[in-house]
Amino acid sequence: MSFKNFPMVSRVIFGRGSFNQLDEIIAPKRNGREAPFIFYVDDVFKGKSWLTSRIPLAYKDKIVYVSTEEEPKTSQIDELVESLILEFSERPSGIIGIGGGIVMDIAKAVSIMLTNEGETKDYQGWDLVKNPAIYHVGIPTISGTGAEVSRTTILTGPERKLGINSDFTPFDQVILDPELTKDVPKSQWFYTGMDCFVHCIESLNGSFLNAFSQSYGEKAFEICKEVFLDDKLSEKESQEKLMMASWHGGMSIAYSQVGVAHAMSYGLGFLLGVKHGIGNCIVFDHLEEFYPDGVALFKQMKTKHNIELPQGICKDLDDEELDIMINVALSLEPLWENAIGKNWKDKITPKKLKQLYLKM
Amino acid sequence: MSFKNFPMVSRVIFGRGSFNQLDEIIAPKRNGREAPFIFYVDDVFKGKSWLTSRIPLAYKDKIVYVSTEEEPKTSQIDELVESLILEFSERPSGIIGIGGGIVMDIAKAVSIMLTNEGETKDYQGWDLVKNPAIYHVGIPTISGTGAEVSRTTILTGPERKLGINSDFTPFDQVILDPELTKDVPKSQWFYTGMDCFVHCIESLNGSFLNAFSQSYGEKAFEICKEVFLDDKLSEKESQEKLMMASWHGGMSIAYSQVGVAHAMSYGLGFLLGVKHGIGNCIVFDHLEEFYPDGVALFKQMKTKHNIELPQGICKDLDDEELDIMINVALSLEPLWENAIGKNWKDKITPKKLKQLYLKM
């Protein structure tokens, strides 16, 4: 039996307004005038000077706005890396991601691909990265994905949607400033928060769980219930707590795995481009059979916050399209093994997944 | 407002039997044949081959057994460092502490003092360490102190009992193997577990608390109740959960502080050599006025586990001795400010502390 030696984020700062300390935090990491800091920023913040004016630019530092219409692709990472190599004479001093899961995953992937040869798609999988990434900082502006603390960066490649899972993936620094989440639209707040909730349900009900992951998962689960079902929290408290739920939910994956919802959501994402948060919700809504208590709570939360999920998104798909989704979902073997157990293939067949997808 | 940028343990491995992975974990950190790994091991394990035979020794590596009769002194660290410098031609490749809070604190302090000039006592305080410590690994064999995750190492110096609090103090690697705690005597299990419980009460009831520390402290508190008051856990589950409670309890101090019990326990430790775990218990038993709910739970736990605390340990002290303890306790200003608030000096006077100490 061998246990994973889990790499943690080296530094974390938490506090309302801690974003103001970004300059003093990154300054010692600057490798000279020719080695810029690159800030990938969710383009929803374009023109929002309350945030952008506080990004500390010096020398050749650059802000690159990133569209979050689509989830990140391996080809997009290759292009971003190439443009940095062409534009600057030296490697960047650091990569800073300011945004949600998409932007944080882009920051992680670019920082890895700046020091590792070849194409991004070749690193999708487990422990394929050879060289340490350059210094990278994650600054979440929405809570729930756990991307700020995880050792993966989820990318859509030509053949599959799969993470670069490696010891070099986690951020060197994370800034947790709950104020940055203040303008998140309600539906997005819900979908992304549910990513955390679904993590917890899948991790706590999985066969891979141990006491380490359980303790983090239980705490994240409790906070999700507090945030999404109780009425006791002020808006600020709710922002702060959900940021911690995301953090703990991400940590709970260290020695566990996600499960059915994530596997099937990846299928929706790959074929239809359905984004991860809403995709999880669409799938999870139909998983009573696997997670009865969790789905019941989810439905309560959905009702309480008047969330209407898209219906029938798979009903017009032909068999070939359904097969693509089913194959993406089935290829995520560790997720199924965690959710169902070693003999998962007895229960989870293409036919079974087709039935489930057709409900969605 | 400025927030602390908290350094985390870089790597953590959790699992029953994970101690067997020590060799593969430290091997890449070896700086050649002349640079040994030094293993500080609690001398309770002398002759316990189930543990010692699994310590991977090579080249000039050395096991140094450490007595835990007394808590570590700054002069002891100076001696340990000097003996390493005299014995080996090169700096060690790493320092590995295998034991409880005392041994882990020794490992942390030695790793710092190998790269920082002067005497250990000069580094007691906050952020006085200039150079990064050498690679150091913490392997707890008892749960509760949080020393495996904290940014301090508590030492008794000629003038005070105070930690070396620095960004270089936390371990580079922690191995959490619950099996290592299997032979802890019951009283020690209780006292050290209560260190965690008291941390949580002090942190959750303190004025410094924020959502980050609260989430960790609440989880540690819940696990302590499960371990010490419920009867639902198997022995192994209890070992695993208490190890996680210690970890989360240590993390909860990141943005908070301990309080009255720790301040007064440091006084007992400095004058009478009362060890930290039992010292906290002796003090906390008399703190209803500050922590009514926590003390009530503590008394339930004490009764349930048939723990008899020493009584009247201060009754024969003269005024001069009492003043020494009182001065040590009062010097820990952040602890009092956390516990009582900014105007703590109005409530906490030498006379008040004398009354409290005389009850103990």
Image (cartoon, coloured by chain):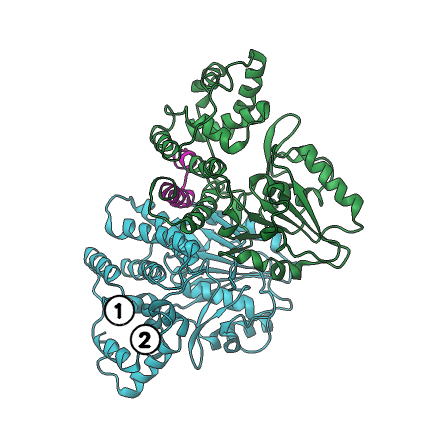
Chain colours: A cyan, B green
Q: Position of residue B133 (x, y in %)?
A: 66, 47
> Taking A183 as reference, is A312 above or below it?
below
In the picture, measured across the screen, residue A306 lies left or right of residue A158, that is: left
Chain holding disc 2: A
Q: Amino acid at mark 2?
A: Leu
* Discs 2, 1 touching: Cβ within 8 Å: yes
Please name the residue shown 40% across and 68% down the image. Answer: A67
Q: Is B231 rendered above or below residue B122?
A: below
- The residue drawn where x is 35% and y is 32% is B300
Evaluate whether residue B133 shows in this view: no
Question: Helix, strand, or loop for circle 2?
Answer: helix
Chain to which mark 1 belongs:
A
Residue at 55% across, 66% down? A111
> Crowdedness of circle 1 by 10 Å Cα count: few (<14), some, many (20+)?
many
The boundaries of the magenta stretch are B201-225
Query: Looking at the image, which is closer to me, A269 or B79?
Result: B79
Q: Any magenta on residue B191?
A: no
Q: Nearer the viewer, residue B91 or B297?
A: B297
Residue B110, percent from left and from top: 67, 42
Q: Nearer the viewer, residue B299 or B92?
A: B299
Where residue A331 sits: x, y (%)?
39, 78
Q: Which residue in the rendered view is the most extreme toward the top?
A: B319
Does the magenta run of residues contain B221? yes
Q: CA distance from mark 2 to mark 1?
A: 9 Å
Q: Is residue A192 left or right of residue B35?
A: left
Determine which residue is flagged by label 2: A268
